[in-house]
Amino acid sequence: MNTPNTPAQAAAEHTTPAHGAPLTDRGGPAQPLLLVKDLKKYFPVRGGPLDRQKRFVHAVDGVSFAVPKGQTLGIVGESGCGKSTTARLVARLMEPDAGELIFDGEGVEEYGGLQLKEFRRSLQMVFQDSFASLNPRLTMQEAIAYGPRVHGVPAAQALAQARALLARVGLEPSQFGSRYPHELSGGQRQRVNIARALAFDPRLVILDESVAALDKSVQAQVLNLLQELKAERQLTYLFISHDLHVVHYLADQVMVMYLGQVVESGPVEKIYNGSAHPYTRALLSAVPSMDPAQRTEVSPLAGDPPNPINPPSGCRFRDRCPHAHALCAEKTPALQAVGGDIHHLAACHLNDLTSGHPLAGKELNP
Ligand code: SF4
């Protein structure tokens, strides 16, 4: 085995893993890589010994979306809105209570045996905690080679691939390959976690707050690396983040969640420059600005989200919405096209001229 001397050499020697062909493109570029339909997950809540009523946290409550091939869907929302649970349900780290996943035109529920294994390899996840994601007893090259080895790749080949991947994520294999997780910085460990995900040659990578724990300068480097890898390997990303600046930079499409439901979705510029839901507008106005003229003294998003065990009737945002009307408590707004644009959806009576909301169709801020 020839060991690459430089990152560039090692990157050039990277080849597709030989541990089994990933699920191949079936429907061409027009077919979404992932379709999620009406996904639900309710967690039971334990009450006291006298509490006989069964109650549930409505963590994900009827979520549907599509991720086009080669694009990044950013999922945003406050903590507890259900974005990370959605990611875990898609990755099959937990079983949904209801809903359907369609991967490149084929229902995941119908997968069996080998195909289910290939689906799991085609989808990899990178978590926020770079340290907890790595086995402290494995060196970095062993950690990256571990998965392919378990799937039957000969040890020497898996190690060579691991070193090539280390090089590709900007870590010199001769310097970092034999190090342990505690000998690396947070940014370096997260690069290793990205390399580990790539070792399976995935088609979809779920990034769950993957850059949230990094310093701003390191975060920018890792984001640039993710962009390069996406173009180079035709990857599709599901990017979960509470940081709207980062999502603006990385995402092509954005989905906004509130209390387990989607309240708005659309192309990134539509969401950031023409959002149609008061919650999205409040989230965006809460982002700190470098421009003193843009700074606000009063938080546009007051209070906490309501209890997910007993969500409000009608629109779930109504307790915090400056434009709430009696109608908002009576009728649940449907997720529908904004101004006839079928790519931009929002769930708010204000966007429906026939809803009966007195402010429907009027210019409002936020
Ligand atoms: Fe506000 Fe009503 Fe729209 Fe909900 S439906 S966001 S409460 S205006």
Image (cartoon, rainbow, N blue to C red):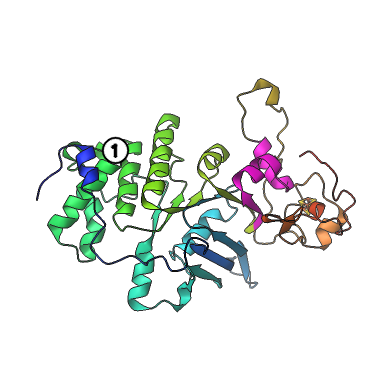
Q: Is residue 151 above or below residue 353?
A: below
Amino acid residing under circle 1: Gly
Quadrant in the picture for residue 362: top right
Dot 1 lies on which element? loop
Q: Considering the image in quadrants, where does the C terminus appear? A: top right
| Residue 341 placement, left or right of 256 | right
Is 325 on the left or on the right of 217, as rendered?
right
Which residue is pictured at 36% across the width and 51% down the height? Answer: 233
**Pointer 1: what residue?**
170
Is residue 277 inside the magenta stretch? yes
| Residue name at image x 24 percent, y 66 percent | 151
- State the extent of the magenta-drawn residues as a range: 262-286
Residue 12 in view (yes/no): yes
- How far across and down, in percent of the image, does residue 5 sit? 15, 38
Q: Is residue 325 magenta?
A: no
Percent of width and height locating residue 275: 70, 45
Q: Quadrant of residue 293?
A: top right
